[in-house]
Amino acid sequence: MARDRATRARHLARELLVQALYQWQIAGHKVYELKAQFSASEDFQRCDSDYFGELLTTIVGEAPALDELIVRYAVRPIEQLDAVGRAVLWLGLAELKHRADVPTRVVINEAIELTKRYGVTDSHKFVNAVLDKSARDLRQQPGAPDTKL
């Protein structure tokens, strides 16, 4: 039961992260502004707030490097990506790169579900392809977890 609650809290943190990253791209808010805004929401009280804060800071700080990874693994120009797709890819890539505690298949499945829910039609296929290709490299590093998809 506690595990289910933790899984739901982490899923909700990912949903809020996609929303915050979308807002960051569109409106250009600072990380501290996004944290303050989202921490005031009712949903935030039920999410894994530490996970949200850590990943938001990491992703905003590494956005150019994450974009380079998208360019490396994508079959279309990054300029054609919508803000939701980019936010989900940033989240998935950051998790693959920095969150060894999260299995690869969980990262990819969560990204697909978020894209289906918030993204444009069929963009989940693109997100799946980029994360699948990148996972092979990012999780092949020494000590990387769960190299099997």
Image: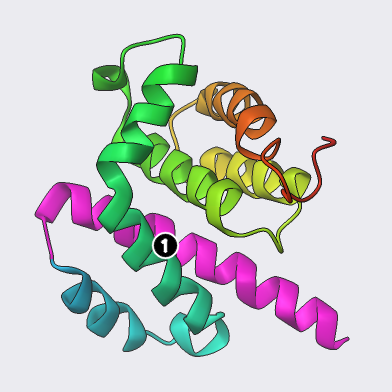
| Residue occupying the far front of the picture | 142
Q: How is the image coloured?
A: rainbow
Task: Find residue 34 and report its image quarter.
Answer: bottom left
Q: Quadrant of residue 17?
A: bottom left
Q: Which residue is mark 1?
A: 17
The relative height of residue 3 versus residue 23 in the rendered view (above or below) is: below
Label 1 crowd bin: few (<14), some (14–19), many (20+), radius 10 Å: many
Residue under the image location 54 percent in, 21 percent down: 126
In the foreground, 46 or 79: 79
Q: How many marks?
A: 1
What stretch of residues is rendered in magenta?
Answer: 1-29
Answer with left or right where residue 36 lies relative to residue 69.
Answer: left
Q: Residue at x 37, y 61 (%)?
A: 58
Quadrant (top left/top right/bottom left/bottom right) for the C terminus: top right
Residue 103 in the image: state x and y as whole percent: 76, 52
Relative to 108, is 15 above or below? below
Q: Residue at x 27, y 57 (%)?
A: 61
Between 81 and 41, the one nearer to me in the picture: 81
Q: Position of residue 31 (x, y in %)?
A: 21, 70
Q: Please, what secondary structure does the residue beneath circle 1 have?
A: helix
- Percent x, y of residue 130: 55, 25
* Position of residue 58 in the picture relative to residue 31 (left or right): right
